[in-house]
Amino acid sequence: MYRKVTVLSLIVLFGLLSGTVFASDGAALYKAKCATCHGPDGSGGTPMGKSLKVRDLRSDAVQKQTDIELTKVISGGKGKMPPYGKQLSDPDIAAIIAFIRTLKAK
Ligand code: HEC
C-alpha cells in the first residue's frame, strides 16, 4: 500500500514537472514541422496534404491508434510521411501527440 502511494505520487510529480520545467510545446512543434502537410487543424486540407492524400488526424482512424502506434509513425515515418526520430526527442513527440489528441475534440 505504502509503495503504491509512493509510486503514484512520483508519477503525479513527474507529470507536473514535465508540464512546467521540461515543457515541450507540442502545438508550436506541430505548427513548425507538421502543419505544411497535415494542416494547422490536422485536417490535411493543405495543398501538400491533398497531394499526398494524408488522413485527417482528427478522424477515428487516426485517433483510435495508441500513443505508441502514433509515436512509431512520427519517429520512423510511414510511406511518404518523413521520419522525425532524429529531429525530435521523445518528449517532443509525446507533446505533439498530446496536441493531436486535442484536435479531436474540436
Ligand atoms: C511531407 C509531408 C508530411 C509532413 C511534414 C508530416 N507528415 Fe505525417 N504523414 C504524411 C503522409 C503522406 C502520411 C500518410 C502515410 C501513409 O499512411 O502512407 C502521414 C501520416 C501521419 C500519421 C499517421 C496517420 C494515419 O494515417 O494513420 C501521423 C500520426 C502523422 N503523419 C503525424 C505527423 C506529425 C506529428 C508530423 C510532424 C512532426 C508530420 N506528420 C509531418 C505526410 C507528412
Image (cartoon, grey):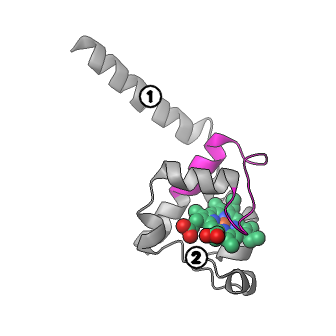
Point 62% across, 42% down: residue? 91
Q: Is residue 34 in view?
A: no
Nearest the camera: 47 or 12? 47
**The quadrant where residue 7 appears:** top left
- Taking 100 as reference, is 65 left or right? left
Q: Secondary structure at mark 2?
A: loop
Residue 44 place in picture, x, y as percent? 62, 80
Q: Residue under circle 2? A: 41
Point 44% across, 28% down: residue? 13
Vertical side of 36 occupied by 82: above or below: above
Earlier-in-chain disc, 1 versus 2: 1
The type of residue carrying mark 1 is Leu
- Whether residue 21 is in magenta: the answer is no
Magenta-drawn segment: 77-98
Q: Residue under circle 1? A: 13
Nearest the camera: 106 or 68? 68
Ligand 1 falls in quadrant: bottom right
Q: Secondary structure at mark 1?
A: helix
- Taking 86 as reference, is 6 left or right? left
